[in-house]
Image (cartoon, rainbow, N blue to C red):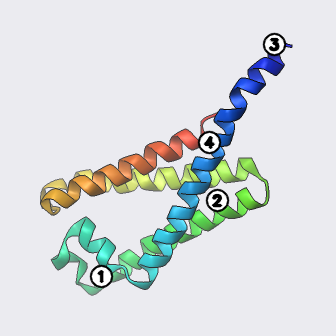
Amino acid sequence: MLGLVFLQQRLPYRRARHAVGAGIAVGRVGLGAGALVAPRPLLAMWVGETAAAGPAAQVFGRALAGRDLALGALALRAVVAGRPKAARAATALGAFADGVDMVATLRAWPELPGGRRWLVLGLTLGATVAGALAVVD
């Protein structure tokens, strides 16, 4: 009986966790698709206009976009297929990637554009934490 009560109390959390994971996946697909087509606006926000204008930045921007698009699509496919373990694994991989982006931002902090670096740090930190919370049981 106690197990049933415990399970019922955890059910809303699991639903919320799945919803958060699916929301992150949708956002990741949208961000990845947009940046794959036009990486410069996202890169300019992150590293500044001058750095984002170069061809190397465009290459790396599209590579990061492909990563996000693939991770988001993988997570969404798992959600739609009703495979919560696979969805959590894909979300965890995305959270790891977001954490790497956050560390990269912090390492380049002095060279990044003033106010925008705080926005990027907030986005990467938020995505890392949300992704991690979405996979914790």
Tell me if mark 2 has few (under 14), some (14-19) or many (20+) residues whose alpha carbon lies within 10 angstroms of its own: many
| Element marked by disc 3 | helix
Q: Secondary structure at mark 1?
A: helix
The amino acid at mark 4 is Arg
Residue 2: mark = 3
Report the side of 4 relative to 124 (left or right): right
Q: Earlier in the sequence, mark 3 or mark 4?
A: 3
Give the residue displayed 33% in from the left and 82% down from the top: 58
Q: Which residue is mark 4?
A: 17
Proximity of marks 2 and 1: CB atoms separated by less than 8 Å: no
Q: Which mark is residue 56?
A: 1
Q: Position of residue 70 (x, y in %)?
A: 58, 69
Report which residue position mark 2 lands on. 75
Q: Residue furthest right?
A: 1
User: Mark 4 or mark 1, which is nearer to you?
Assistant: 4
Q: Amino acid at mark 2?
A: Ala
CA distance for labels 3 and 2: 33 Å
**Residue 110 figure quarter:** bottom left
The crowding category of the residue bearing disc 1, from other C-alpha atoms within 10 Å (few below 14, some 14 to 19, many at least 20), is few
Numbered disc 2: secondary structure:
helix
**Residue 89, image x, y percentages:** 64, 50
Q: How far apart in space, not on screen, are marks 4 and 1 (Cα)?
A: 37 Å
Rendered view: 15 above or below 120: above
The earlier-in-sequence mark between 4 and 1 is: 4
| Quadrant in which the N terminus appears | top right
Q: Is residue 84 left or right of residue 112?
A: right
Q: Where's residue 129, x and y in %?
A: 45, 42
Q: CA distance from mark 4 to mark 2?
A: 13 Å
Q: Which residue is located at x 45 percent, y 80 percent?
A: 36
Circle 3: residue type: Leu
Above/below status of 1 relative to 12: above
